[in-house]
Amino acid sequence: MNTDDVVRTFLDFYRERGHEPITGSSLLPPPSDPVLFTTSGMHPLTPYLRGRPHPQGRRLVNVQRCLRTTDIDEIGDLTHLTVFDMLGSWSLGDYGHPQSLRWGYELLRDGFGIPREKLFVTVFGGDEQVGPDLESLDTWRELGVPVESTRDENWWSNGPVGPCGPDSEIFHWTGDGPPEGVPTGDPRWVEIWNHVHMRLERREDGGLVPLRQVNVDTGMGLERFVSVLQGRRSVYETDVFEPWTRGVRTLWVLDERSLRIVCDHLRSSVVVLGEGVRPSNTGRGYVVRRLIRRLLTVLWRDDDSRTLTDLPEELTGGGTVRRLLLEEERRFSRLLERGRRVLSRPEFRGELGDEEYRCLHDTYGLPRELVVGLLR
Ligand code: SER
């Protein structure tokens, strides 16, 4: 199955079970929303999880483009991406969590052909505030899928306050030999799908109150799922990333980790710039600036004559996005040049303290992060 087949299979499965497909929201939430980017499929649905009736009903399904900067330091591993698509299904006060788990299992087994032996799930084992999720435990046992109970890893929230609840995560075995160990103890178990029992609201004071309705929110990272299904070692080896890895490999010789960072940051930058965000020193603009500068730092580590100008238009497009990428490259290159010049002065020799860093920032416009990179 390629990526399009996976999306179609997921949407059809839920449509056949009464779910209305809803259009994914923008990657940029409205100004009234405190978050910079849409981080999950449920985020735009928050008012409806809290009880407002959704115009398309109580069973929904969609594909949502998401961006997560919390994972930025993990980029370069086999499974994390900055920008990714999330397949999601929702019951807004309609069917319960066990039904969601049963359908989830049915879809994985019959729709995607995944044998039970390749699956392991985790459920919430309880903490001081909320008891163990026995309902999910029983459902998985009934389905014959092995279960592990955890505490912190099986609680989902989208921030310090707001809708939240215990979740059940489904893992797929990606090792070469037969499955062994448990998800929390063996990274070859890769999380592919999360079913959240979204039934509580975290208040400012840390207390939990029941939501007006009991919901189910599920989310499956598309690129990661496709890589598992296609038996690839990483998300970068799937059909979605093929043009990126091919394009980048043709131009530059990079170790595997650097190749992944360059591909991820390049693709994410192109997406974010394409949404109209412009590089700057604050908010969303800072996120895209950081992505571009991180990718250039990796590229220039071995050879500072490398340039984004060489990228084919197939990847960047020929218009504004490409122009912005190249402008940011020039700006960063000039900044580095100035940085090297300034740092070679006698007053900046030896160990730098807070005062020198402040001076470099305030007088020469050189951020601490950049200076640290140059000194390295
Ligand atoms: N909200 C959950 C997640 O993002 C499930 O959709 O993982």
Image: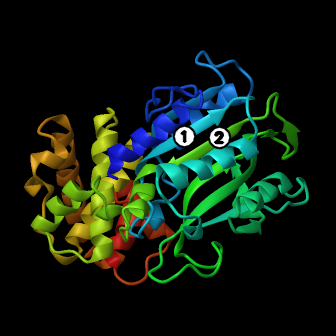
Disc sitting over residue 88 in the figure: 1
Residue 83 on image: x %, y %: 40, 49
Residue 37 visible, this orientation: no
Specify whether 239 is left or right of 5.
left
The residue located at (44%, 66%) in the rendering is: 357
Task: In the rendered view, tell whether residue 42 sits above or below residue 68.
Answer: above
Please tell me which of labels 2 and 1 falls first in the chain.
Answer: 1
Pick whichever, 214 or 307, lies toward us: 214
Q: How was the colour assigned to the protein in this rendering?
A: rainbow
Disc sitting over residue 182 in the figure: none
Specify whether 310 is left or right of 43.
left
The residue located at (27%, 55%) in the rendering is: 239
Say if disc 1 is inside 8 Å of ligand 1: yes
Residue 148 on image: x %, y %: 73, 69
Tell me whether the residue at label 2 lies in contact with that at label 1, contact meaning CB atoms closer than 8 angstroms: yes
The residue located at (71%, 58%) in the rendering is: 143
Q: Amino acid at mark 1?
A: Gly
Pick whichever, 158 or 106, lies toward us: 106
Say if disc 2 is inside 8 Å of ligand 1: yes
Instruction: Give the secondary structure at mark 2.
Output: strand
Q: Quadrant of residue 284?
A: top left
Crowd band around label 2 with a 10 angstrom C-alpha radius: few (<14), some (14–19), many (20+) = many
Residue beneath label 2, please?
Answer: 217
Pick whichever, 72 or 10, lies toward us: 10
Crowd band around label 1 with a 10 angstrom C-alpha radius: few (<14), some (14–19), many (20+) = many
Residue 190 visible, this orientation: yes
Residue 344 on image: x %, y %: 25, 76
